[in-house]
Amino acid sequence: MNRDDFEWKIEEEWLKDVLVEIHKQYDKNRDFKEKIKEDAIRTQKELWDEIGSVSIANGLDQIADFMQFISFMKTQKISHESTRRLQEKYERMLSSPYFGRIDFIEKEDSKAEKCYIGISNLINDNIDFLIYDWRAPLSSMFYDCEIGEAGYTCPEGIIEGELTLKRQYKINNGKIEYMFDSNLKIDDEILQNILSKSTDSKMKTIVTTIQREQNRVIRDEEYKILIVQGPAGSGKTSIALHRIAYLLYRYREKITPQNIVIFSPNEIFNDYISNVLPELGEDNMYQTTFKEYMHKALGNEFSKEDYCEMMEYILDVKETPNYQNRIDNIRYKSTVEFMNILKYYVLYAERKNRDFRDIFFRGQLIVSADALEELFFQEDIKLPLKRRLKKIKNRIFFLMEPYKKHRSEEIMEELKGTGNYINHVELLRDSITLVNEEMADIYNEINRITELNLENIYRDLFENLEFFYRSLNIEYAEDKIEKIRRYTLENLNANRLYYEDQIILLYLKIALGDIPKTSEIKYVIIDEAQDYTPLQYEIFYQLFESANMTILGDLNQSINPFMNVENYNNISHIFSQSNTCIMNLTKSYRSTKEITEFSRKLLNNEIIDEGIQRSGERPLFLGFPDEEAIKERILEDIRTYKDKGYKSIGIITRTIKETSEVYNFLKEKIHIKAIRKDDDGYVSDTLVIPAYLAKGLEFDVVLIYNVGNGNYYCEEERLLLYTACTRALHILCIYYSGECTPLLN
Ligand SMILES: Nc1ncnc2c1ncn2[C@@H]1O[C@H](COP(=O)(O)OP(=O)(O)OP(=O)(O)O)[C@@H](O)[C@H]1O
């Protein structure tokens, strides 16, 4: 459609009307915001005038008045915040108020309703919907239906009818740049156009071109646990974030961003995705990583290995004598078999006799061993161990109280007799101190029976590993289990806590009730789901038992060959089958056809990937005599691609060690950044990064550093290389020195 068309003129008129309405609402909101600001300043002044400086000496009434002021000021702050958000939304709408239109005739109606679709509803004073939010029930037809019979589900039921028009717009700065009618899906020109652009910033919204299979995941409300498997670049992360926006809209009375948590692979990724929800007019949910959560929960008692340290070890120290032991350890502790042993061990630890003894004070029985045992084994057996122990502790304290009081009175009399005290408070204090000293053995005994020492519990598990296999009637290879046992205990004795061990410790801490469960979180999103072990899923489940979960991953992108989910069947027993569903995405959007085809060949098992047919240059393979020559060529290529207008360039290495080498070579010559820790922030532009930290990210140009000389040589590193290659949108260059990896033959 072009500007001279009659239809274009009508659309321009409509846009003008819509912009007038947005302006009107924008101004009203701005005035309201100003008023709130003035009110807030006035409240502050009143607080100062009426209350002045607060002191307990001025009486409780002053404190009560002060608290009332504070609560009022909090409400003002919340209102101000919400008008600020509205202002931002109107600003975005003034630039681009909508991106789609559908004309829909409801059954039994004769006239089609024109429905414009944008990032937010716009309703005028007559309660006419000038724009529908993309998340509104009706808007789903824009993504799901073609011209002809159509319908949508809303709280009132299914609404059926006919779609007579579907139109897409590109509106920028309040002007229509282009528009066209599409009879079929939205994978046409607009999508091609979006995908062929250079990327220079963080992740963007895809709201204008959400595809049908993606829309299904975004709007699903049927399943409590939704597992989404999709190839690289199929939009899993985008979907996760749009799903959050959808849930916030759909259940706006019930959930807020504080009720949602997303587990991302690392901080870089967290940073990379942080713009999407604000662009959609929503506040960000709580973002964290498993490592961050785990390290907080385990505290500072242990010296803990980092995720990156583990990955570097796996990739870089293959020649050391202990390497195989460590790998066997990681592999073993990631198996379902070990998880079952661990679950059994928790039951065992919860019921293990704690060698209760009678507790006496000055010859009088405070509580008998039998009574304690009964309390431990019978009354509260369903409670987690930590809570049962706490109850026992409180019970003993309660029973001690009369003895303590009586003895303290006795001592007070004795002290009075010394004639050294004139002050009653001092007398009381000293008598209590003396009673506590007399009761020191009892306190020690209480600590002994109620202590929950995680390290000892962990040690106990491995000291008796074979016993648990036998108890569960699981066949096992004695020498293998003995090796694991010895290796674990050796490391514990040396105060070394590997990443895989930390996960077990965290599980024990949660299962034994040493971490409170939260019901605050109602939705959990787990991205890059392939890289969590079944045990980690068990942890997610225990922590967020009542929450809904969306789990998104690609089994072909398991960056750690020894520590991953391997197969979603491995976690199926954790979640109830009746409300769990696995949905598959089939298309990829990120890379050109050539890059997608090339990367797909890297996978031994063919995946069904329809791909969007966007053509580009074929991936380049370049061989060099040594690493120095590769670096020289990379420098030259960065300059060339920058000159060609590509904005983001990722030089992907295998390890952090290589990242440092390449960065040190380049840093004096061009503007470049390096990512060498998983809690670094995301930077766009030109970046050197190890492959396992680049997962989830994307670059216009990907330059893969050295796939020769033993790098990516073994089968275990195939998926790591695949993950690295699939980060490229437009250009992929692969460099090698010496002999190229057989994985690329
Ligand atoms: N419907 C869509 N319209 C426009 N762009 C899309 C669409 N779906 C995905 N994309 C784009 O494809 C790219 C890949 O998306 P995303 O990172 O969400 O995929 P992913 O499945 O999480 O990838 P990976 O598993 O490889 O990390 C992004 O640039 C995203 O904007």
Image (cartoon, rainbow, N blue to C red):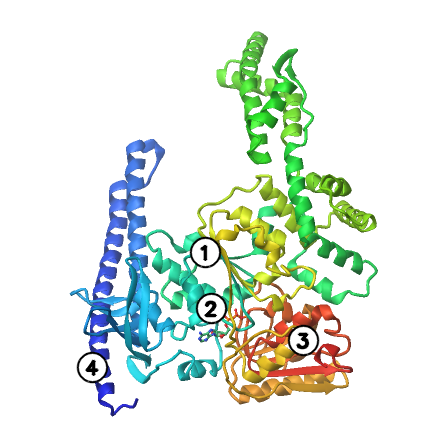
Residue 13 circle label: 4
Q: Which of 63 and 170 is in front in this view?
A: 170
Kindly report which numbered mark, 1 or 4, lies closer to the viewer in this rendering.
1
Determine whether the residue tagged by mark 1 lies in a helix, strand or loop. loop
The residue under label 2 is 238
Residue 223 circle label: 1
Q: Could you tell me the amino acid type at mark 3?
A: Asn
Q: Could you tell me the amino acid type at mark 2?
A: Ser
Q: Position of residue 484 (x, y in %)?
A: 78, 50
State the residue at coordinates (43%, 84%): 193
Mark closer to the chain start, 4 or 2:
4
Rate crowding at label 3 as few (under 14), some (14 to 19) or many (20 or more) other CA atoms within 10 Å: few
Q: Where, by quadrant of the figure, is residue 352 drawn?
A: top right
Rate crowding at label 2 as few (under 14), some (14 to 19) or many (20 or more) other CA atoms within 10 Å: many
Residue 664 circle label: 3
Determine whether the residue tagged by mark 4 lies in a helix, strand or loop. helix
The CA span between labels 4 and 2 is 34 Å
Whether disc 2's CB lies below 8 Å from ligand 1 is answered yes
